[in-house]
Image (tube, rainbow, N blue to C red):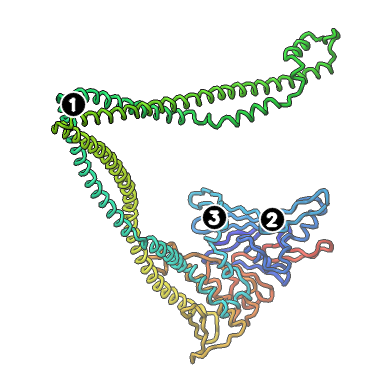
Amino acid sequence: MILKQIVIENFRQYYGQNEIEFAHGSGRNVTVIHGENGSGKTALLTALIWGFYGRELKLPNSESIFNNKAIHESTNQQEDLSTSVRIRFEHNDYEYDLRRLLHAKYDDETNILNLPKNKTVNQKVELSKRNIATNQSTKIRDIAYEINRILPYKLHTFFFFDGERMDHLGKKEAYSEIRDSIKRMMGLELFDNSIDHLSKTIVKLRDEVSKNVKSELSDKYLRINQLEEDKVKKKHQLAETKQELSAAQNELKSIENALRNGEETRAFQTTRDHLVESITETKNAFDEKLKELRNQLSNSGYLAFSKLPIKRFQRIARTDQRDTIEKLIHPELIPSLLSNGTCLCGHELESTSISTLEKVQNEVLDLSTSKNDMDHLYFQLSGWEVARAHFYSQIKRLISEREELRATLQLLEEDLREIEERMKASSRNIENSTNLIEKESSVRTAIVKAEANIEDLLRSIDELSREEELLNKEVSKLTKAEERQLRLQLALESATKVKDTLVGLLKLRESQVKSELEEKIKLTYSQLLRKDYSISLTDNYELLVSDVNGGNIGLSQGESQITSLAFIGAIVDLTREYKDKEKGHALDEDLNLGNIFPLVMDSPFGALDADHRSRVATNLPKLSDQVVVIVSTSQWRGEVDEAINHRVGRSYKLLNHTNEVSGEYTEIAEVM
């Protein structure tokens, strides 16, 4: 990322619009901003941070974002007021335009300029990017995501920092922050996130694979096999029973023929045949009446429950309190009066009378409509009453006819039993006839039993088939689940292998990054520090400084700042080399690792002596393609000016003004 321009409007000390064009490149890549204490050096650094991220300001009186002079003028002029920061920057072949704004509205009633209370919620942010090659512009919707993708908020303190921040990075409490930042900048966080995601995926896959589908599927198959065996047995029994029934029916026909042909039994058998035929017809008629009764109940059974609703409606209809106007006035009377324009008494209708009559006419029409609806419903329910009476009449008829058929059937069966007894009595002395009659009785019993068995077997086979059909559907689902489990098993194995591979790559990558970073830190440290100290980076990314004998060194504040600066500069330099493909690995190009970051520093030379200021000033422009230095005159003059002046591409001065009414304010002026 390269900063191109910042435009500050009515932000903190900065009154009106103030802008800075930033230098960058391999030559004059330094922008220097001169400012004395209290002129707004820290506010300028804060404007950059607020413009990018919109977080609460870490400054004294952090709620005071609007410039005091601008507030005073807007109040006097009774106008609204805005404060904003606009930043133009380049990143990966795109030019971005970011603007963050807060608006204060003047209240005409109270004569007060209402400053927004929640300065985070009330912000308005706009971000667009332009493809430098094609000149095509795009408006960014998810602004926070885009900014954090380019320069994450957690990393901003490494590139927008002051002298105190540099000192902080050399302390032990910063080690975890340093480690996380290095992982993010060097592409290691990508491995961490991938490993974490795979670990969660592996847990879910294990849960899915652990479900015992095979056992459940096996139980279903065993049950289906059992059902098939039971069906085969039932079908075999059904076939045998049908054969037995057919044989019994044939035997019965032979016996009946023999009885018809016998002299002693012929007359009885003829009568008996008629009785059997009548019994069969009566039974069929009895069953038909039952079907009619069921149909009647199914189609019109609701009428049995209609009595209470009908009575309730009739009671409501009888007690309906309609306005008596409907009973007194004929619907055609008022239209006739209005048409003639005269009253019943013969006088002409006045305007007020016409208005009253029209109102009454509307009421009569409404009441008439209501009455029509009520009458229509009353008529329908009256039809229900008739249908209900007919329903009960039909039910009673069918029950009565069925009972008559039952009585007829009983009489026929009694006559049949009497005939059979007479047949037996008349043929007792004739052995052959007696045997035929007894055999006929046993055959008929066998036929009834066989028919009942056939009905039971058919019902049982049907139930077995339905259960088998349901089981086959469940088996189909379980089979798909088992196939899915096999795929999940393969996915689990693949995910585990990928995770193990990534863990190995991460270890290798960490080792490579740590080695390269440590080499870069040592080189930078040796250029910045005049003492012959040795610096190393532990596995936890802890910076250790030791003397020539390997003993630990207690660093001064200035030496701690130089240590921190060496660390930051090494990271920026190394990521730039990755970006330019001077270093790195084949994987870097595929992952698009490496980047260019600016170094924006507020008072970086404050705690350094003359020699160290010269060293830092000399080497600072070499660490990044863009360096922005915000310094006081005392920090800049002398050795710093001499060491860095030839690398300065842009120079600005913070001019502090004092106003007796609105107080101090600052403007930015370019130094030519």
User: Residue 519, how many percent across, how many down?
Assistant: 45, 78
Label 1's element?
loop
Residue found 26% across the figure and 23% down from its top:
274
Residue 109: assigned label: none
User: In terms of sequence position, does the residue under pointer 1 or pointer 3 come before the other?
Assistant: 3
Residue found 52% across the figure and 59% down from its top:
91
Report which residue position mark 3 lands on. Answer: 95
Residue 652 visible from this viewpoint: no
Residue 268 visible from this viewpoint: yes
User: In terms of sequence position, does the residue under pointer 3 or pointer 2 come before the other?
Assistant: 3
Q: Is residue 417 above or below residue 58?
A: above
Report which residue position mark 1 lands on. Answer: 265
Residue found 63% across the figure and 72% down from its top:
162
Classify residue 413 by image quadrant.
Answer: top left
Q: Amino acid at mark 1?
A: Thr
Q: Amino acid at mark 3?
A: Glu
Classify residue 50 by image quadrant.
Answer: bottom right
User: Residue 14, how many percent across, how many down?
Assistant: 72, 61
Q: Report the mark closest to the observer, 1 or 3.
A: 1
- Badge 1 crowding class, 10 Å Cα cut-off, few under 14, some 14 to 19, many 20 or more, is many
- The answer to whether marks 3 and 2 mark residues whose Cβ atoms lie closer than 8 Å is no
Q: Nearer the viewer, residue 471 or 493?
A: 471
Q: CA distance from mark 1 to mark 2?
A: 120 Å
Q: Report the mark closest to the observer, 1 or 2.
A: 1
Q: Is residue 621 above or below residue 318?
A: below
Report which residue position mark 2 lands on. Answer: 102
Q: CA distance from mark 3 to mark 2?
A: 24 Å
Residue found 48% across the figure and 51% down from its top:
133
Q: Is residue 174 left or right of residue 516?
A: right
Q: Is residue 380 above or below residue 490?
A: above
- Badge 3 crowding class, 10 Å Cα cut-off, few under 14, some 14 to 19, many 20 or more, is many
